Amino acid sequence: AQSVTQPDIHITVSEGASLELRCNYSYGATPYLFWYVQSPGQGLQLLLKYFSGDTLVQGIKGFEAEFKRSQSSFNLRKPSVHWSDAAEYFCAVGASSYKLIFGSGTRLLVRP
Amino acid sequence: DGGITQSPKYLFRKEGQNVTLSCEQNLNHDAMYWYRQDPGQGLRLIYYSQIVNDFQKGDIAEGYSVSREKKESFPLTVTSAQKNPTAFYLCASSPPISGNTIYFGEGSWLTVV
């Protein structure tokens, strides 16, 4: 069955520290992969996406993600977290926009 | 500015009433979607529409209805048949050649009182 797992419900990091949010998926083929960010009570904003090519993808706000086929993972990273990065992050996978599967999200808390 | 506008932002409904959430986009996107989000859960697809006058059920369509009479508009009606309608509802759209990227509105909170 197709699925997306974000194993960390909450993550707390100190401002200026590095960040890695995990995303693992189960899918029959190489899917399209996305990371979205959601501030409280707001819609989702696209951070980055992977379709093919270079497995290291750069996104907005200094985020990047690496597709690892052998591990079925698409982890999100940022070298230095800012307080404004506190939000909920969703990984999504799918073969088409009509069939995207979203993970349950990881809430990021940033310590001053 | 181009974007997706959802209204109202907050809506209260009495049990047994139908309510309609509005979604308008001026991005000239062909496809539109409605998702439901519950606390601690990901997004679940309610309905989607690829073109005008056509729409398909998503994973949790029971108790909901939609229409797509215009390209720009995709209203969602939450009927009294929906057992647990209190949730955050997100409208989204995508262009025909997008690499499957979906763009979201700001969401609408529905509370049953």
Image (tube, rainbow, N blue to C red):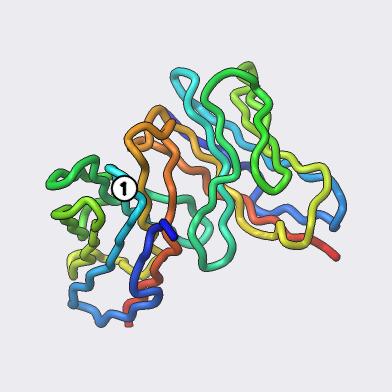
Camera-side residue: B4 or A109? B4
Quick check: B111 left or right of A34? Answer: left
Q: Quadrant of the N terminus of chain B?
A: bottom left
Q: Position of residue B44 (x, y in %)?
A: 38, 49
Quick check: A9 left or right of A100? Answer: right
Query: Which residue is located at x 63 percent, y 51 percent?
Result: A106
**Above or below, comparing residue A89 to residue B80 in the picture:** above
Query: In which quarter of the view is residue B50 placed?
Result: top left
**Quick one: label 1, few (<14), some, or many (20+) residues within 10 Å?**
some
Quick check: A101 left or right of B81? Answer: right
Q: Which residue is identified by label 1?
A: B28
Q: Position of residue B83 (x, y in %)?
A: 26, 65
**Above or below, comparing residue B101 to residue B32 in the picture:** above
Query: Which residue is located at x 73 percent, y 44 percent?
Result: A62
Query: Which residue is located at x 54 percent, y 37 percent?
Result: A34
From this viewpoint, is residue B59 visible? no
From this viewpoint, is residue B24 visible? yes
Query: In which quarter of the view is residue A49 placed?
Result: top right
Secondary structure of the residue carrying numbered label 1: loop
Camera-side residue: A50 or A6? A50
Q: Position of residue A58 (x, y in %)?
A: 67, 34
Q: Position of residue A33 (x, y in %)?
A: 53, 32
Query: In which quarter of the view is residue A98 placed?
Result: top left
Camera-side residue: A57 or B63? A57
Q: How many marks?
A: 1
Query: Which residue is located at x 68 percent, y 39 percent?
Result: A76
Q: Amino acid at mark 1?
A: Asn
As drawn, the residue found furthest toward the front would be B1
Q: Quadrant of the C terminus of chain B?
A: bottom left
Chain letter of disc 1? Answer: B
